Image (spheres, helix red, strand yellow):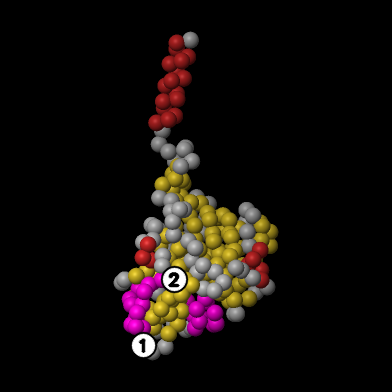
């Protein structure tokens, strides 16, 4: 009996002391645009298999039925969107990498569309304990991770019409009107770019915040998404 108890104690000690396996769970938020429309797609997947769930937000047409996706290679150069879970069912979209954080492809019955990566965050999951490290689930984060400062959660106080400088944290399209209305302008905002911001406001139909920025010609302006419920894309200072 004493030997059995000793063996059990040694086994339990060895099990508890073994290094925990860390799996990376990644969340990506993509902005998809096509002729006359736009929406957001939230992807959750493990870097072990490069496939997972897809949650459409404010999507129309075929994209509102997307439920899962898969990257066909480890370099994430091609993405396929599926109607059913576990990468099954009809293919509702297929995209190829066209640039850094950008993809181009077709949706539905062959309508051209573009995708821009707005944010990407990773959480390390401890498989032995079910705990996680580095999670920012309880706060609004920057695109690179980490909880956003309080000053970046509210619209800046811009007085007397004098623009202030703000840093773009992700590649983004520039729209002629607040709320992403109208066809995107030819000029785009680049990650790390310092923009002159004239004013910011909350959208009428959502919690999204948009800012009016001065274009490169120094005269015309456009609008970029500053923050949504989960992520800050444009922060104060450069």
Q: Pick whichever, 159 or 82, lies toward us.
A: 159
Q: Is residue 200 left or right of residue 112?
A: left
Q: Is residue 94 left or right of residue 208?
A: right
What segment is highlighted magenta in the picture?
155-184
Q: Residues within 10 Å of mark 1 (few under 14, many from 20)?
A: few
Q: Is residue 108 left or right of residue 72?
A: right
Farthest-out residue, left: 238
Q: Which mark is residue 175?
A: none
Q: Pick whichever, 182 or 229, lies toward us.
A: 229
Judged by its main secondary structure, the magenta piece is loop
User: Can residue 105 be seen at all in this image of the molecule?
Assistant: no
Name the residue: 59% across, 76% down: 37
Relative height, residue 234 to residue 46 (above, below): below
Q: What is the x, y in percent for residue 19?
A: 40, 36
Q: Secondary structure at mark 1?
A: loop
How many tags in the picture? 2
Q: Residues within 10 Å of mark 2 (few under 14, many from 20)?
A: many
Farthest-out residue, top: 1
Q: Which mark is residue 226?
A: 2
Identify the residue position indicated by label 1 in the image.
218
Identify the image quadrant of residue 216: bottom left
Q: Nearer the viewer, mark 2 or mark 1?
A: 2
Q: Secondary structure at mark 2?
A: strand
User: Can residue 146 be seen at all in this image of the molecule?
Assistant: yes
Name the residue: 31% across, 72% down: 238
Relative height, residue 95 to residue 14 (above, below): below
Q: Earlier in the sequence, mark 2 or mark 1?
A: 1
Name the residue: 48% across, 61% down: 230
Q: What is the x, y in percent for residue 163?
A: 34, 81
């Amino acid at each position: 009996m004493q030997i059995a108890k000793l063996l059990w104690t040694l086994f339990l000690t060895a099990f508890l002391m073994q290094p925990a396996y860390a799996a990376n769970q990644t969340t990506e938020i993509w902005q998809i645009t096509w002729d006359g429309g736009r929406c957001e797609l939230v992807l959750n997947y493990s870097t072990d298999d490069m496939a997972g769930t897809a949650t459409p937000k404010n999507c129309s047409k075929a994209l509102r039925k997307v439920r899962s996706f898969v990257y066909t290679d480890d370099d994430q150069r091609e993405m396929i969107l599926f109607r059913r879970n576990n990468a099954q069912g009809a293919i509702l979209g297929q995209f190829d990498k066209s640039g850094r954080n950008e993809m181009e492809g077709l949706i539905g019955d062959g309508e051209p569309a573009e995708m821009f990566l707005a944010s990407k965050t990773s959480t390390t999951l401890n498989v032995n304990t079910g705990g996680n490290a580095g999670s920012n689930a309880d706060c609004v984060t920057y695109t690179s991770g980490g909880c956003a400062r309080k000053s970046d959660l509210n619209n800046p106080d811009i007085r007397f019409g004098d623009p202030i400088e703000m840093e773009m944290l992700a590649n983004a399209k520039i729209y002629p009107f607040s709320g992403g209305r109208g066809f995107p302008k030819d000029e785009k905002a680049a990650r790390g770019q310092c923009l002159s911001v004239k004013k910011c406001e909350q959208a009428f139909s959502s919690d999204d915040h948009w800012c009016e920025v001065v274009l490169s010609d120094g005269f015309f302006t456009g609008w970029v998404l500053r923050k949504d419920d989960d992520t800050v894309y444009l922060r104060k200072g450069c």
